[in-house]
Amino acid sequence: MSERCNFIASSYNRLTVSDPTSFPVLRLLDANANRAREALRVLEDYARFVLDDRDISSSLKAIRHTLTESLRETLSAAILHRDTAGDVGTGTKMPAEMSRQGLPDVVIAAGKRLGEALRSLEEYLKISEPEKASIVERLRYVFYDVESQIVRSLHIAKRFADVRLYVLITEQFCKRPWLETAELALRGGANCLQLREKDLDARELLHRAKQLVELCRANDALSIINDRADIALLAGTDGVHVGQADIPAIEARKIVGPNKIVGVSTHIIEQARIARTDGADYIGVGPVFRSSTKPREILPGLSFAREAAEQISIPVVAIAGITLMNVDEVLATGVRSIAVTSAVTAAPDPEAAARELKRRMEPNQ
């Protein structure tokens, strides 16, 4: 980000104004400059208020200010020839232009509009102000890089938004056979199961992942594989979950594609922000309590869960050491989803344990 901002800032001092361009070209420059600034404002607002991403927001703001400054004198002349009422294009609208199905549509449309406007500005400035055309070209390349980050943030798996109880299945922590335990957890109301087996060979892991997929589909629940994006793709699970020592979410996405869920374990707010920017669909936050199934030296605790719930726009799942005895403390942070292992899988009756946890997760209980 610093190199972009340095280029943008230094551009102010290198701008020169040549002889005024012809009347039609002035109108072209005026129209496309307006398009570009408007699109930048839409994207900047998304980065600021939805992503809460300081770097992306600052980069977009810097592009907008540089564009305005670089064309200030040229457009001061152009605005005198503006004729909105007489513009033959103002009354031409395609049906799709007046319809947006949701936030992704708004953001993607603004990105396309900005790229096109910058390219048009660049081409027409070459006629009489090639130095400014070169600056606009650089701004366009800066934007393409920023746009890729924005687009990654738009991949939101809507089904995951409804997940409240997420159960991790690890055979060594199951009192019953792992597949039976998984089925009982689903009967008790688990919305999502993750197969977490660190020590299985790839052949057996793939076999179990396929079994989990079949079971989850029969119970209208999500299936996730831990760590192995390749196994997730081959088995047809709904997604993959990666930790801080695994491949980043942005790389996992390249393997599993745009239609699968990618989750990321996080322990500090900076990791959570990176995961969101990299296109994660949800983050795990924790450990919130000490856990016998996955001992750790660090303990971000409830304070991190609260911080993530307040600041991160994608679903937040609290994990580690959560039981019926402390689940209310977790919910008090604003987190709406929990992930558990032993609280369900090691219970004498996994179905009853899941059902009671799920009941506590429901509003007004």
Image (spheres, rainbow, N blue to C red):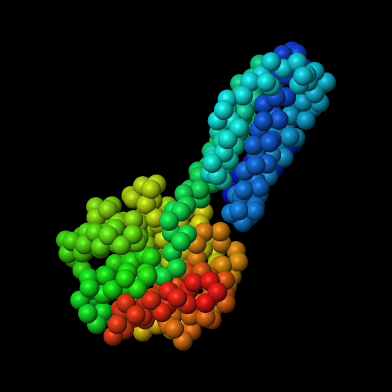
Q: Where is residue 204 in the image (x, y as percent from the top left)?
A: 17, 64
Residue at the location (57% across, 28% down)?
95
Q: In this view, does 5 lie to the left or right of 172?
A: right
Residue 363's place in the image compared with 75, above or below, is below
Vertical placement of residue 352 versus 243, above or below: below
User: Residue drawn at (43%, 83%), measured in percent from left and top?
Assistant: 323
- Residue sticking out furthest to the right: 80
Apparent side of residue 267 relative to residue 74 in the rendered image (left or right): left
Task: Name, please, the residue furthest toward the front.
Answer: 364
**Front in this rendered view, residue 355 or 201:** 355
**Res. 188 visible in picture:** yes
Residue at left offset 56%, top offset 46%:
103
In the image, residue 149 above or below residue 269: above
Q: Position of residue 36 (x, y in %)?
A: 66, 33
Image coordinates of residue 338 in percent, x first then y, are: 45, 72
Asked if 129 appears above or below 179 in the picture, the reply is above
Look at 18% across and 61% down and name the residue there: 207
Q: In this view, does 16 lie to the left or right of 89?
A: right
In the image, 167 versus 320, the foreground residue is 167
Horizontal and vertical percent position of residue 208: 21, 64
**As rendered, which of 351 and 51 lies closer to the eye?**
351
- Residue 138 in view, yes or no: no
